[in-house]
Image (cartoon, rainbow, N blue to C red):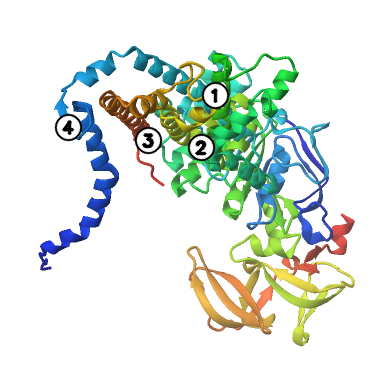
Amino acid sequence: MAQITLRNLAHSYYPNPQTDRDYALKEMDHVWQDGGAYALLGSSGCGKTTLLNIISGLLKPSHGRVLFGDTDVTEQPTAARNIAQVFQFPVVYDTMSVRDNLAFPLRNRGMDAAYIKARVDQIAAMIGMEDMLARKAQGLTADAKQKISLGRGMVREDVNAILFDEPLTVIDPHMKWELRTQLKRLHREFGHTMIYVTHDQTEALTFADRVVVMYEGRVVQMGTPEELFEKPGHTFVGYFIGSPGMNFLPAQVQGRRALLAGGAAVELGGDYGAVSGQVQIGIRPEHATLVADGGLPFDVTRVEDVGRHRLVRGSVLGQPLNVVIPEGMAIDGLPRVAFAPDRVNVYADDWRVAPAAEEAA
Amino acid sequence: MEKTWNNKAWFLVLPVLVVVAFSAVIPLMTVVNYAFNDTFGNNQFFWAGLEWFDEMVHSERLHEALGRQVLFSAIILAIEVPLGIFVALNMPKKGFWSSLVLVLMALPLLIPFNVVGTIWQIFGRVDIGLLGGALAALGVDYNYTSDPLDAWVTVIVMDVWHWTSLVALLCYAGLQSIPQAYYQAARIDQASRWAVFRHIELPKMKGVLLIAVLLRFMDSFMIYTEPFVVTGGGPGNSTTFLSIDLVKMAVGQFDLGPAAAFSLMYFVVIMLVSWVFYTVMSNMDRAGSDIPEEL
């Protein structure tokens, strides 16, 4: 087990990268704590798998170093890193039995037979395949095969980290919950560093202590689920986390006030001074309320019932805006929308700007 | 729907029947005819029953040729299959070099058999051949026309040169179908090179490998042209394989009855072996999919 440090890490699949666009992974500097449960979240093609493969050594980064603890492992092959990785699609050794599949990583390390048997039985119980151990892996369902892959990933106790690359894609929803809970329990029990790649925010937010959001080859924010929700570091995080995503309105910010198009003013939770660049304010649909007077004029286009609450879609000063209201609340007679000042975030060129008080702290 | 019955439709099958009759049935029946009769020319036949078969089954000459044939097939299979796998494992997987290597590998397969024989016949000659000359210059006592061992080595090396590509190309196709994720998983699981071969590559190559073995067995068991051009079956009878012996008997000595009986038995043996192979292969396929895959 080890802390993973990415030092000035970047990767390009081209031999001579020129512009930023040639990089699948833009330069990053991060420390992943030993024993942390991380989720790597982002849309398809944002570099999640590239980053994962660099950590496991399946891919050699074109720039920068990877450290496990204090050891530089950049040049080390995968086998020397003692790391486990579970892939998106099941990889099982067809000709082996389920038992041999699970035992394979241990046998390769030359563990003794009694230990292997005990450990395999333990893992089999965890993935619920005790009664299938003697069967050949060939011909099992995709579900079962992926459980074997997961089991093989977890069978070594001394791995530096366990990496999951969207491992539950092929598992059916009921089993997904169960396996995720198992993973979570395993994490609490053994304290392995776990990195879990996904594009599903629910999966990320329920699994991880810290969520790493990637966008176009860049880590745009690394934080707790709460931080991602309350203070998205980048407009992408605002869009991506939450359902629906954050509302953004173009504005000019001066001190504690934001001026929207048409001169309407929104009060802010802190002093931002003068913000330059392309400025937007961001507000979660959960933090906007419909009011009878005050606030901004709001034109409702549609109301959707989404279970525990209702979602009101509309526009404010020509910009689309979503508001979440409690179930059963009437919207008649509430033609305006107001924002909680300390929940309004300010963005310049897509990056969050911290107010003066927060910066000082 | 009302079906129209029209027996004229049978005429449409006629061309096929004619072609098959002239290309297969009639020649084969002629052989059968020769095998059960004796003839002294003039198209006069005398019933001989199983006499020729009896003679051939107990023929020392045929036993020796069969022994040489089995040994030859066994040796070339033992060399070409592992060598083919080894070459396939080391071929470049993509890019310019992979295309180039594929073309180079295919070359020996495209050369007509008698040309292959001629190439090696000249290549191995001590007086003008590059190989023979070089060996002589190095002081190796090599002469395929007088030494049976040298003749065998030459014929075997020639066959390996000619046909290893086939095994390699088939295995290469099998290897190319393995998804990259398997190799990655093996690296994660810290598998040794041997374990990767044993548990990932070999199982995926199994199907094509069986086809390669079947093809190489049949072809080598029927081999005629190349050794005939190089050694003519000699020195003595040391490289006289079944086909060469058969042709000598039928065309050289004009013993049509025994030769016909011989070729029928030969035919049956090859059919039997191929059938066994086929059965084993399809059984293995079935064993592989006994549990239906649910996806």
Q: Element under label 3?
A: helix
Name the chain under label 4.
Answer: B
Q: Which residue is mark 4?
A: B44
Q: Nearer the viewer, mark 1 or mark 2?
A: 2
Q: Which residue is mark 1?
A: B156
Q: Nearer the viewer, mark 2 or mark 4?
A: 4
Please determine if labels 2 and 4 lie on a single subunit: yes
Q: Are the residues at dot 1 and dot 2 in contact (C-beta closer than 8 Å)?
A: no
The CA distance from mark 1 to mark 2 is 14 Å
The CA distance from mark 3 to mark 4 is 52 Å
Q: Are the residues at dot 4 and dot 1 in contact (C-beta closer than 8 Å)?
A: no
Which is more N-terminal, label 2 or label 1?
2
Which is more N-terminal, label 3 or label 1?
1
**Disc on res. B113:** 2
Which is more N-terminal, label 4 or label 3?
4
Q: Amino acid at mark 1?
A: Ile
User: Which residue is found at the position 35% from the left and 17% from the top?
Assistant: B62
> Label 1 neighbourhood size at 10 Å, few (<14), some (14-19), many (20+)?
some
Q: Element under label 4?
A: loop
Most foreground residue, A107 or B243: B243
**Disc on res. B285:** 3
Name the chain under label 1.
Answer: B
Q: Are the residues at dot 3 and dot 2 in contact (C-beta closer than 8 Å)?
A: no
Residue B135: image x %, image y %? 70, 20
Q: Is residue A309 visible?
A: yes
Name the chain under label 3.
Answer: B
